[in-house]
Amino acid sequence: MIGIFDSGFGGLTILKAIRQRLPQYDYLYLGDNARAPYGTRSFDVVYEYTWQAVRYLFSEGCQLVILACNTASAKALRTIQQRNLPAVWAEEQGYQEGVLGRHRVLGVIRPTVEALSGYTRTGHVGVLATEGTVLSDSYPIEIAKLYPHITVHQQACPMWVPLIENGEADKPGADYFVSAYLSRLLAADPLIDTLLLGCTHYPLLLPKLEAFLKTCPQWQAVNGRLLSQGSIVADSLANYLLRHPDIHATCSRGGTTTYLTTESEQRFSDSAAIFLGHSISASHVELN
Ligand code: DGL
């Protein structure tokens, strides 16, 4: 089974693209909706919550876990990879040496940055993300490593995830915050021709983002593009599995998806159905 984790509903945008690309595998989705949003939480808290979730997915039989959350990828991935895998957790759980060596945790920031070069013509990129991701500077740092010629401007959008988690993404109230954050970012650099949605929740605002950008002469002049992460992460996972036959061998192939949430099962199932376009049934879990 492949584990997919997000603070809430956002990772469903990644799951959907992964399932379209790789329908043959079994997936276990975990949304920590009860504690979302993560975007304004401290490094230590995001790490702690993320590691609890990853441990849970491991204990349910996932050997490969995707952090389908930029905030967790920015603030927890490196620590989990360096501190928790493989030694400490394996010992705690009484695993024999070497067993945890097959467990992997992957994030979404690096694959997104790797895919970026094909998109910008002006060399000016805007990143829309949570406060946590912006403050971590993960995107500017990773982009500078691969493409030193690209200029990056970031905009934190702290109201977007609460709007989405509370089912307000398509309501008129969301318009103000869409326009406020996009205007600020485009005013900071009129040459931006690529806007990266650096939070997996944000594709749920796509209709409103596109509608606003249609009214921006500056954006139309550079023939700008909005970039979501779903298909990028799905391609990157397919490629990863090809390059790692040992991990590939641990992924069961039943074509199933199971949904877990730390919030109410009903609330998750209802909202997830809207995101995915079909009904699902979720189970409640406690993380600690
Ligand atoms: N989907 C998460 C991300 O990509 C949302 C963060 C949050 O919970 O604030 O960053």
Image (cartoon, rainbow, N blue to C red):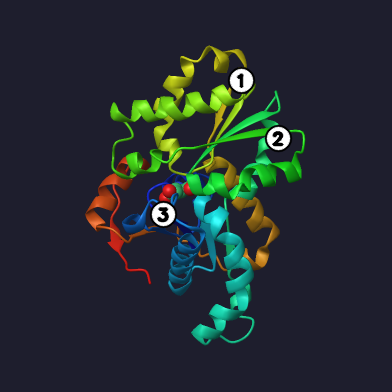
| Residue type for callout 3 | Ser
Is 215 drawn above or below residue 205 in the view shown? above
Ligand 1 has an atom within 8 Å of the beta carbon of the residue at disc 3: yes
Residue 117 disc label: 2
Asked which secondary structure carries label 3, the reply is loop
Residue positioned 25% across, 47% down in the render: 270
Pair 1/3: label in front: 1
Question: Is 168 left, or right, of 75 in this rendering?
Answer: left
**What's the residue type where badge 2 is placed?**
Ser
Q: Residue furthest left?
A: 266
Q: Mark 3 or 2 closer to N-term?
A: 3
Q: How crowded is mark 2: few (under 14 residues within 10 Å), some or many (20 or more)?
A: some
Q: Residues within 10 Å of mark 3 (few under 14, many from 20)?
A: many
Give the position of the C terminus as an image quadrant: bottom left
Alpha-carbon span between mark 3 and mark 2: 28 Å
204 up-or-down from 37: above or below: above
Disc 3 target residue: 7
